[in-house]
């Protein structure tokens, strides 16, 4: 049973950081308790980009959730207020990205764009994007695998050869 957590990549211009977690074997079970209010303030999102997992909330009425990649697991209604949860890995080599804001006065906005084969989408700089697909171009560069990109200084034009999904993460200044 192995869980590998890679060092966080901080993107200070975007006010975001990303941590990748790799779960090696199906059947692994991890229990966790968060004591960080950042979860309830909309500053963190977890995204399963490979494999699958089940999330349970012991001693609550919260229903069990099952996710298979690609899947955005938003703390919002799922985890907010639920400090303790159990994760069961459903497939070998399941992988997550945890995206969070670097500054507490920012919230994390996550959106998903579907691009049909032969179509394009323009993404404005100032965000992290994860493209789930194996045949697309990013600013006319041919890409053949799903990948995470930081759009710090340039906009992006994504053209899908086969349909793909684009997950967009932006830090937004909170309106108090």
Image: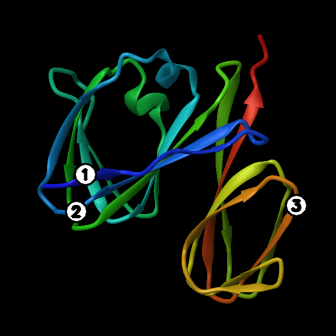
Q: Are marks 3 and 2 in contact (CB under 8 Å)?
A: no
65 left or right of 113 in image:
left
59 left or right of 133 in image:
left
Which sits in the foreground, 144 or 123?
A: 144
- Tell me where residue 163 appears, x and y as whole percent: 62, 81
- Quarter of the image with the N terminus is bottom left
Say which residue appears at 33% left-offset and 21% top-offset: 82
131 left or right of 54 in image:
right
The residue at which mark 2 appears reads as: 24
- Tell me where residue 63 appears, x and y as whole percent: 25, 35
The residue at which mark 1 appears reads as: 3
Count residues near mark 1 (Cα–Cα under 10 Å), then give few for <14, some for 14-19, many for 20+. Answer: some
Q: Quadrant of residue 158 in the image?
A: bottom right
Mark 3 and mark 2: span between their CA atoms? 35 Å
Mark 1 and mark 3: span between their CA atoms? 34 Å
Which is more N-terminal, label 1 or label 2?
1
Say which residue appears at 16% left-offset and 27% top-offset: 58
The residue at which mark 3 appears reads as: 154
Q: Which residue lies furthest to the top in this view?
A: 176
Say which residue appears at 22% left-offset and 66% top-offset: 91
- Secondary structure category for the residue under label 2: loop
Q: Quadrant of residue 161 in the image?
A: bottom right
Which is more N-terminal, label 3 or label 1?
1
Count residues near mark 2 (Cα–Cα under 10 Å), then give few for <14, some for 14-19, many for 20+. Answer: some
């Amino acid at each position: 049973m192995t869980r590998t957590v890679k060092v966080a990549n901080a993107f200070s211009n975007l006010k975001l950081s990303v941590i990748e977690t790799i779960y090696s074997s199906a059947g692994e079970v991890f229990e966790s308790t968060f004591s960080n209010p950042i979860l309830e303030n909309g500053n963190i999102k977890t995204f399963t980009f490979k494999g699958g997992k089940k999330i349970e909330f012991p001693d609550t009425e919260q229903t069990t959730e099952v996710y298979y990649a690609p899947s955005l697991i938003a703390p919002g209604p799922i985890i907010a207020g639920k400090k303790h949860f159990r994760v069961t890995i459903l497939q070998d080599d399941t992988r997550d990205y945890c995206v969070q804001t670097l500054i507490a006065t920012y919230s994390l906005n996550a959106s998903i764009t579907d691009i049909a084969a032969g179509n394009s989408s323009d993404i404005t700089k100032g965000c992290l994007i994860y493209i789930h697909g194996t045949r697309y171009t990013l600013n006319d560069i041919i890409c053949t695998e799903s990948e995470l990109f930081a759009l710090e200084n340039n906009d992006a034009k994504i053209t899908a050869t086969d349909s793909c999904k684009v997950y967009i993460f932006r830090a937004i200044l909170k309106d108090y």
